[in-house]
Amino acid sequence: MARAVLIRLCFMLALVGLLTGLGAARAEPMQAGAMRIGIHPDRTRFVVELPGPVEFQAFTQAEPYRVVLDLADIKVTRPLPPPGGLIGGVQLDGVSGPGSRLLLDTKGPFKVAAIAIYPPSAGLPHRLVLDLVEVAAAGFVAKPPPNRLSPREAGRAPAATNAPRPPAAKRPTAKPVIVLDPGHGGVDPGTVGVGGMHEKDLVLDYALELRRRLERTGRYRVVMTRERDIFLRLSERVDVARKTNAQLFISLHADSIGSAEFRGGAVYTLSETASDEEAAALAAKENKADLLGGVPLDDRDNQVTSILIDLAQRETMNYSARFTNLLLPELAERNVAMRPKPHRFAGFRVLKAPDVPSVLLELGYLSNRQDAQFVTSAAGRAAIVAAVVEAIDRYFTEKRN
């Protein structure tokens, strides 16, 4: 009898120990992933990969200039990134509770241009992304710690600045429409690269992969101007964007030039005044594509040209520029070769939808062997597509807030 009671008691103690261990395991905080600093022409970006949307707080200090990031229920165990750009050092400060505090000391006064947690995309997990911009001392404003957030605000903490808010819990009912426009097609092959690659085939491959990656997120409706090797007039491409009420139009191209030395991609937005002679020449060449299909150019876009001076068109052009400013750092972060001053301007007919933000992405020079090898490789395509998807996510996140 006594032996049976003892066995039962040992079993109960073991069970209690097991349950206690499981409870302790559940209480273990989540671990932060990789951290990195990206250095871009107009900003320094700090990224922390996260296991999910989490609660965070951010505030700024002077003497020394610093951003303080508090991550609730997240433990930082990965190596801290080395200094870079505006960030002179990253430290881990002890805080009470299960969270972590990161101290980002800067080399001078700054402002927080953007801070948000972004959902998984292009093979990357949730990320906290912080963009810092250098300012004069008079432009720096120290912000005290915000009040602690309630649990239901987790993952949606606004920065202690006027930065855009991270994604809100309530999503719009209609998905944004994105139109992808693979340039050329049919009787118009576009550029022929050093390896015999036709531009029309290359950009179609990119557009199909980009559509697949965007649709996989479940956040967008993607429409393509062409899904096969057919010829389309430039005006037909614009019509697709307008008829679908697109919120973003991306035209994909690759360039060539007489010299094999030139390389690098670029992003063009609409302007009746070209940013340089090369941009003007490229726009003239692309705008003549209709002639290959037996469609003469005429003055049918005079009405559109008049709309360009309207305030609505100017607002559209501002949105186009905003998307470009988000895309270029993503391309640079993935080591995609870009031309000097990669944001360029020209009067491309395909960008003239007056109410649809539109950009033309030149992948690179197919006349340059390095560019041709990169953009036709699986690694190059993955890098460029990932950059575009990330920029699209950031663009629509900012528009929702």
Image: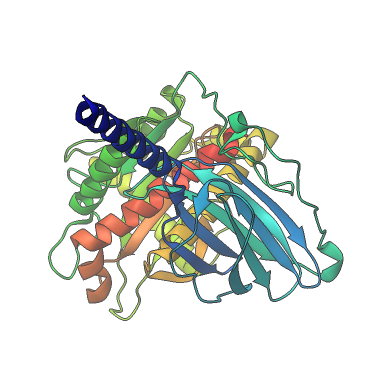
The percent position of residue 344, horizontal first and vertical second, equals 52, 60
- Between residues 268 and 130, which one lies in front from this camera angle? 130
Residue with the most extreme top position: 173
Rendered position, 82 above or below 245: below
Q: Who is closer to the viewer here, 134 or 47?
A: 47
Instruction: Name the residue nearer the viewer: 304 or 111.
Output: 111
Horizontal and vertical percent position of residue 233: 32, 37
Question: For residue 306, what is the image quadrant?
Answer: top right
Left or right, 180 with respect to 275, comes to left
Q: Would you say residue 388 is visible in this rendering?
A: yes
379 left or right, relative to 31: left
User: Measuring 49% from the left and 61% from the top, which residue is drawn there?
Assistant: 329
**Residue 23 image point, x, y percent:** 41, 37
Residue 255, by quadrant, is bottom left
**Considering depth in this image, is 261 or 82 the residue closer to the camera?**
82
Q: Is residue 65 above or below residue 391?
A: below
Across and down, in percent, residue 317 comes to 59, 44
Q: Residue farthest to the right?
A: 138
Whether residue 296 can be seen here? no
